[in-house]
Amino acid sequence: MRMQRAAIILIVFILGTMANAAENSTDNALLLQRRYLFFPIHTGAPLVRVTLEIDGQHAREFDAELGSAADASFWAPLDVANFVGKKAKLSLGPDKAGFKRVRQVDELPSVPDLYNEPLRPQFHFSQRVGWNNDPNGLVYYDGEWHLFFQHNPYGWNWGNMHWGHAVSRDLVHWQQLPIALYNKQYGDWAFSGGAVVDEKNTTGWQRGDVKTIVASFASTGRGECLAYSNDRGRTFVEYEGNPVVRHNGRDPKIIWHEPTKHWVMAVYDEPDKDTKNIAFYTSPNLKEWTLASKLPGYFECPEIFELPVDGNPKNTRWVVFAGDAKYAIGKFDGRTFTPEHDGKHQVQYGAYYASQTFSNAPQGRRVQIGWARIDMPGMPFNQTFTFPHELSLRTTADGIRLFAEPVREVSLLHEKKHQLQGQALTAEKPVDVAVGNQLLDIRATFDIEKAREVGLDIGGNLIRYDVAAAKLNEAQLKPESGRVMVQVLVDRPMLEICGNAGRVVITSPRTKLGDISRVRAFANGGEAKLVNLDVYELKSIWSGQQEVNSSKP
């Protein structure tokens, strides 16, 4: 009911205050007078090819499920700031009537319940409207964490791949900025890739004191491409020499390899349908690349990074990480990666895919964000991202392994705290903590003792540790000195379950949605001990959220 009222308010606002795109136009020609063209999107409607021509050249081209003001699932903005004052031609395929539904607006309107929709994550970043998948171009520069991402701004489903953009100063609170990379033309989409800060100006693109941020992305029509920014990531210029690598593959992630003083590109390479590799290319200047080696058996969205073992900077390993969250540990000489073990390891499980770590992060931190593959039915947006996790290499009984824990900045959201210690648990005697929030950071430690199972019931969402199977939900996890530690981040549509201080992390949709009145610790099949249960109620990151309509830093 609340969503219906909000939709009615928005429709009245749109009809009453916005200029129709067809004003002062004939035959789909129009003068662009305002910053945005606003399209009513009706999820499930037939796709219409939208083409915006400027001076006879295709400037923007994409597919959209065009609706009307009355039946719009949401309104999608097309930023035409660079073309204001120009004459344009807007084509909507065979849909002649659709032209009159499009509006010109100066600013994105205030939408009732924006960022407070029933399934809107409250402390995980999600885009204003449309679809997201892979995080792209994660890079830190001058106090800002940049999250670029695969984005369909014009639909609830996958398609029309652009690079969306958001920034944060604390890894917790995010502001969405204008689209960073558009497709070159229809069918030539801006697929996944990375970003680096060209500290040494190897490209020669730097102007002034601001370092150049260089994005590497897969153009579906050309190959691996570059775009660069001299205004702290607000606008990008495509390199005129694109593509810099031609092959059958995608998802370039670039790093600077200090010992050899050259750039390294890790990129998915598929020379034929039966062969999957990570290819490593090297370059002195990001423009000219030479194939150095290939690592077989890995799929898309690869990257490579170095970490100290147990925090010792004199003892480091390199990690190769791919889109399916499988990884290997080994040595890397700047050209060839040599694994030091057979097979692959895994730290992330569940509805998790295509993660990436931030380049250039301060204090040597290695921070990772993944795509949380969770549908958001009935919402103006779809999918979301995981909370940032910090990675480390630690020595375990099984060898060196990668650990992932929620970044310490989660404490910025902590409000009311509930705490229990030293409680006996049996099937007949669980322990409850009353809460008044469905945004939670829960930390529990169990002494297993004689129990067959221990776990948490979070408003009907069950976290189970099966002692015989040594499994935390679906992830293998061995006890440590007879104990299991669990941290659970609870948001409106999702859970992130961290076992034994980051040994495994599971991302999953909530099976039971809505308010949570209690958190229950339980044991089955024998007695266990709840060593501690700390429950922090969290505040939303969207409180007082301001729409970012400017491309200025």
Image: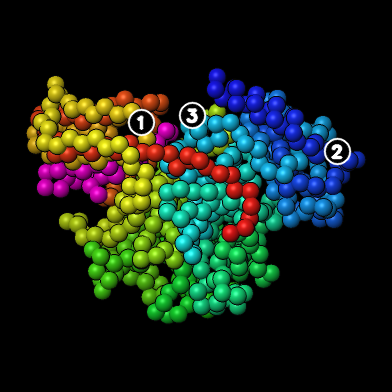
User: Mark 3 Cα within 10 Å, few/some/many (few <14, many 20+)?
Assistant: some
User: Mark 1 Cα within 10 Å, few/some/many (few <14, many 20+)?
Assistant: some
Under mark 3, the amino acid is: Pro
Q: Which residues are magenta?
A: 476-501
Under mark 1, the amino acid is: Asn
- Helix, strand or loop under label 2: loop
Where residue 302 sits, quadrant-wise, is bottom left
Tell me if 339 is positioned left or right of 250 in this view: left
Residue farthest to the right, as pictured: 26
Residue 299, x across and y down, in percent: 46, 55
Q: Does label 1 or label 2 sit earlier along the sequence?
A: 2
Q: Which residue is mark 3?
A: 118
Assess whether mark 3 and mark 1 are in contact (beta carbons under 8 angstroms). Answer: no
How far apart are labels 3 and 2 at the CA level? 37 Å
Q: Considering the image in quadrants, where does the C terminus appear?
A: bottom right
Tell me if 287 is positioned left or right of 264 in this view: right
Q: Magenta span has 489? A: yes
Assess whether mark 2 and mark 3 are in contact (beta carbons under 8 angstroms). Answer: no
Q: Which residue is mark 1?
A: 437
Q: Which residue is mark 2?
A: 23
Residue shown at 65%/38% (left/top)? Answer: 109
Where residue 429 sits, quadrant-wise, is top left
